[in-house]
Amino acid sequence: MNNSSIERLRERVRGPVVTPDSDGYDEARTVYNAMIDRRPAAVVQCAHAGDVMAAVDVARDNGLDLAVRGGGHSVPGFGTCDDGVVADLSGMRGVRVDPDRRTARVDGGATWGDFDAATHAFGLATTGGIVSTTGVAGLTLGGGIGYLARSLGLSCDNLLSADVVTAEGKLLVASEEEHDDLFWAIRGGGGNFGAVTSFEFRLSPVKDIYGGPLLYELEDAGTVLRSFRELIADAPEELGGFPAFQIAPPLPFIPENRHGDTFILIVACWAGPMDEGERAVQRFRDIAPVVAEHVGPMPYSALNSAFDALVPPGLQHYWKANFVTELSDEAIAARSNTDLGYPS
């Protein structure tokens, strides 16, 4: 990418264009996963959709790779590239709530923390992951699991429309009424259909929930996983959550002599009537002896950010995942008998 192309790009955009000879280049190219170390030719720190359009045009016209960075959590490193152009939307974090229509318009660089803070003020929410530093864009375009999925569906199920910059550098509105094929594509059809600069979500009445983590001894993993599988199948849709393995952090509700031990846990979230929360979560307490718990009424936004400190930026991540249709006895047996030295 030559200097004249860089200068033309700078003339077109509102946000800074950071190149290898710029102050702050190393900071601009750094991403969440410390295992990813790439050196783009230019990082466009976009201020609005027009900047994204310019970044797309310059990358296309120069035959360069284009990476789009939203909230920045991409563990595989899709938010950066070598010798190409990065459209960095992380500065575009506005959230506008319409409480009468129960919708929210969210910029492409917003995180779920931004989203939850804005919507919680109106007693509204949408399914949005389990870590609030996750980007709204990446989670939604990948489907979007979360505590509220059993009652509200995935994040992408609550998407009403999206502003999308295509490879031609055009801005399109994708919805059920406009460009419905593109709308279908960005809700699970794969990748590389465009750069989404804005999302419109359907909101639902969720403000405070009853829930939190319950920790069990590792030797009870099989019992916990089998019981969770059976209980959640017939549980009211307002009851969400997930089982996981976790090394105990030094938190006050965990006995000090157990800090650093590995546990099987269930994180519960009851989003129904608050006076039914204790009874709804009790079924998890009855599975096996609980070593520690931090369960009770809390804002939904508090639960959705409770694990942020466990996954800070700068860790060296290597993740694998599988799509499965059931939690089989064989899978439970294999997982329960594994020597666990790291949280899963």
Image (cartoon, rainbow, N blue to C red):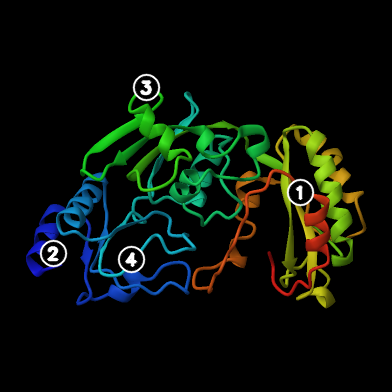
Res 327 label: 1
Per the image, the residue denoted by label 2 is: 6
Q: Is residue 161 visible?
A: no
Disc with the residue nearer the chain's start (2 vs 4):
2
- Using the numbered discs, state the Cα–Cα distance from disc 3 to disc 2 in whole angstroms: 38 Å
**Position in image of residue 265 (x %, y %):** 78, 58
Disc with the residue nearer the chain's start (3 vs 2):
2
Res 81 label: 4
- Using the numbered discs, state the Cα–Cα distance from disc 4 to disc 1 in whole angstroms: 36 Å
Relative to 326, does residue 310 appear above or below in the rendering?
A: below
Q: Nearer the viewer, mark 2 or mark 1?
A: 1
Q: Are marks 4 and 1 in contact (CB under 8 Å)?
A: no
Q: Which image quadrant: the N terminus?
A: bottom left
Res 177 label: 3
Q: Secondary structure at mark 3?
A: loop
- Using the numbered discs, state the Cα–Cα distance from disc 2 to disc 1 in whole angstroms: 52 Å
Relative to 149, does residue 75 appear above or below in the rendering?
A: below
Residue sitting farthest toward the left: 4
Q: Residues within 10 Å of mark 2 (few under 14, many from 20)?
A: some
- Using the numbered discs, state the Cα–Cα distance from disc 3 to disc 1 in whole angstroms: 38 Å
- Using the numbered discs, state the Cα–Cα distance from disc 2 to disc 4 in whole angstroms: 17 Å
Left or right, 56 with respect to 137, comes to left
